[in-house]
Image: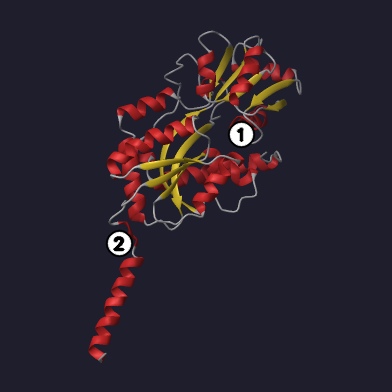
Amino acid sequence: MGPSRRRLFDLAASIVAVLIASPNAQGEGYPERPITLIVPYSAGGPADTIGRVLGEAMRAWLGQPIVIENVGGANGSIAVGRVARAIADGYTISLGLWNTHVSNSALYDLKYDVVRDFEPVTLVASFPLMIAARKGMPANDLQELIAWLKANPGKVTQGSAGAGSMGHLAGVHFQNRTGTHILHVPYRGSAPAMQDLIAGHIDMMIDPPVIILPQLPGGSVKAYAVLAKSRLVQAPDVPTADEVGLPGFYVSNWLGLWVPRGTPKTIIGKLNDAAVRSLTDTTVRHKLAELGYQVPSREKQTPEALGALQKAEIDKWLPIIKSAHIKGD
């Protein structure tokens, strides 16, 4: 091979190498095959339902099916760890929650970093928690409940979906804020805890609307506050914590999409665009509303906004978890 041809060959090889390394080039034809969305909980639950509804809607914008894979265990950390180890090509994405991308970093000894090993795509939905108590609770509003708790330190029981669950940690946060002392009773899920609340075997719960709202029409439990800036459309008579003397006490769970670290920005942009467009769909929004979820405003649906939310939540919750010496089951 002569010098001229060798130079041309080397130049062509360099150009190919640059194109292969370029994130824009990597994302040009994406997606060319089905995408796997790993849901960190079992089939049939709210997270699974949202994953399937969103995945089907995104299919129309991406032109490829999104295959749901349910991977349970260790509060979602097994599933998220699998995504952290996946090839960063946009074909393995994660549905993550506050649990999996915030609290798990303090509850478990993870083999990955919940911030550094992922790229945020978009915030999908959120829901505030509510404070509820057994129907025989003598307190008629939140301030009376706090006063009753202070008068009965160490005698009041709060049920939750388990050690390290958001309900449990919200209870710890509530005690820190109000100067009360409540006994935590962990269950294997919110449903059995609610059954015991209805039966009067425990005194209170701090849980999502999907668990509490169905009990309100029949008076099975009392609802004292929504832990958000605004009241719920589904329960307009339940005041916010701001309105009943606990200003700024906001506790919300949320869901988002993440991809492995190093995924090309072009691919992240395509996934974000498909998700954002899907969240404008009436059917998707209706299904989310049925489950008690709220769709975020457009400015909160950017990858940067999800990353900022995650970091703010880590800064808020990790000191609470660590000071209470809580570890996951």
Neighbour tally class for label 1: few under 14, some 14-19, many 20 plus, Cα within 10 Å: many
Q: Is residue 203 left or right of residue 237?
A: right
Q: Secondary structure at mark 2?
A: helix
Q: Residue at x 43, y 56 (%)?
A: 88
Residue at far bottom of view = 2
The answer to whether the residues at label 2 and label 1 have Cβ atoms under 8 Å apart is no
Identify the image quadrant of residue 142: top right
Residue type marked 2:
Ala
**33 vs 195: above or below:** below
Nearer the observer, disc 2 or disc 1?
2
Identify the image quadrant of residue 168: top right
Where residue 165 is drawn, which disc sits there?
A: 1
Q: Residue at x 36, y 28 (%)?
A: 285
Residue type marked 1:
Ser
Neighbour tally class for label 2: few under 14, some 14-19, many 20 plus, Cα within 10 Å: some
Q: Secondary structure at mark 1?
A: loop
Identify the image quadrant of residue 57: top left
Residue 297: x and y, percent?
36, 35
Q: CA distance from mark 2 to mark 1?
A: 42 Å
Where residue 25 is drawn, which disc sits there?
A: 2
Q: Who comes first in sequence, dot 2 or dot 1?
A: 2
Tell me the quadrant of the picture where the N terminus can be found.
bottom left
